[in-house]
Amino acid sequence: MAAMKPRTGEGPIEVAKESRVIAMRIPADGGGRLVIELNATEAAELLEALKGVVG
């Protein structure tokens, strides 16, 4: 049996292009990660929305 690593919410946000989608993994409070899959259009819309908030 392989060793199991505990899942924690610590660590950086990860973004990777996987086949036809962009997968974003965000650490969550209480452990684990929230995984969001976006297409290129949705990622561009998210970028513009974040620019409006962050500056």
Image (spheres, helix red, strand yellow):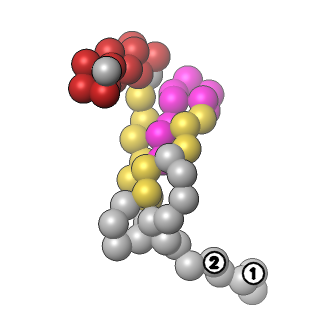
State which region is magenta: 17-25
Is residue 47 rendered to the left or right of residue 4? left
Residue 21 on image: x %, y %: 51, 28
In the depicted view, which residue is nearer to us: 38 or 44?
44
| Label 2: element kind | loop
Q: Quadrant of residue 43?
A: top left
Q: Looking at the image, which residue is at 47% across and 40% down? A: 24
The answer to which image quadrant residue 3 occupies is bottom right
Q: Which residue is mark 1?
A: 2
Question: Which percent across, then down, holds residue 47?
Answer: 38, 20
Which residue in the protein does label 2 denote?
A: 5
Instruction: Give the amino acid type for the residue marked by disc 2 in the picture.
Output: Lys
> Can residue 42 be seen?
no
Q: Residue at x 75, y 81 (%)?
A: 2
Asked if residue 42 lies in the magenta stretch, the reply is: no
Q: Determine whether the residue tagged by mark 1 lies in a helix, strand or loop.
A: loop
Furthest-right residue in view? Answer: 2
Q: Judge left or right: residue 27 versus residue 29.
A: right
**Residue 20: x, y in percent?**
55, 23
Question: Given the image, on which type of amino acid does mark 1 rest?
Answer: Ala
